[in-house]
Image: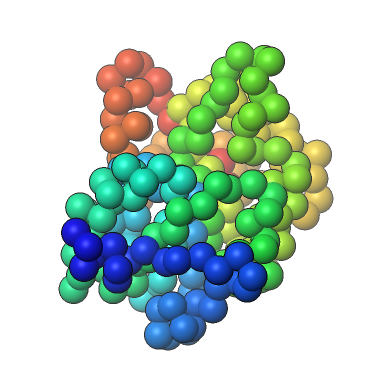
Amino acid sequence: MNEKRNFFEIKIDKEKQLDFREIFGNDNPIHLEIGSGRGEFISLKSLLLWNKNFLGIELKDKRIEDTLKKLDLEKHKNVRLMRLFVDENITKVIPTESIEHIYIIHPDPWPKRKHHKNRLIQNDFIDALYKILKIKGILEINTDHEEYALWILNIFRQRDDFKIFYEDGFTTIPPEGHIVTHFEAKKRKEGFEPFLEK
């Protein structure tokens, strides 16, 4: 596990932004997953899109360990992981206009109204994501919480810097190549269908 951690995990220097060419050894486009959970998505998506570089961000070390178990030193050379608390300060670590595609899969919905201020999807955070996305970059969000899906949609409908991809704002039809994560499978068993917004 130490060998995997040494290869896959990036140590952050808060004094400078990441240099993706130095990290990956190439100029392939960067795909960013915010909240890698148990690693199902990044470990599989990075194999499907082998010509893209994948950076997964997770705060909890246990989840970094779970993801490392799913990564292979030979098959996943295009994957790196990073421990980071994610908020609007992400721009201090990730360079402007450096990311081709951002995935946020099942962020905590914080369902109680008094906790809505804790939700990840807020305008200040979206401002920061807009800065790190390349021109015509994609922000893709999945949630199985209908009220949160509508909250997210409402935020983006009030902005003019993002174009909503789906006519209704989201879809419940899994796209081709959709990867089911542990949390999605668990919620599906409870009767919750995911909403995809991008």
Question: Which of 65/101 is in front?
Answer: 65
Task: Assign the N terminus to one quadrant of the image.
Answer: bottom left
Using residue 98 as the reference point, say whether residue 9 is left or right of it.
Answer: left
Q: Is residue 156 visible?
A: yes
Residue 17: give x, y in percent of width and height. 61, 72
Residue 171 lies, with reference to residue 159, above or below; the image says above
Q: Say if 59 sits above or below 134 in the image.
A: above
Q: Residue at x 32, y 42 (%)?
A: 62
Q: Is residue 155 above or below residue 33?
A: above
Kindly indicate the quadrant of the structure image that contains residue 51.
Answer: bottom left
Location of residue 31 in the rendering, given as x and y in whole percent from the top left corner: 47, 64
Q: Residue 173 in the image: x percent, y percent?
A: 42, 36
Residue beneath the point at 43% across and 31% down: 194
Q: Residue at x 35, y 32 (%)?
A: 184
Q: Is residue 56 left or right of residue 108?
A: left
Q: Nearer the viewer, residue 53 or 67?
A: 67
Q: Residue at x 75, y 45 (%)?
A: 124
Q: Which quarter of the figure has residue 23? A: bottom left
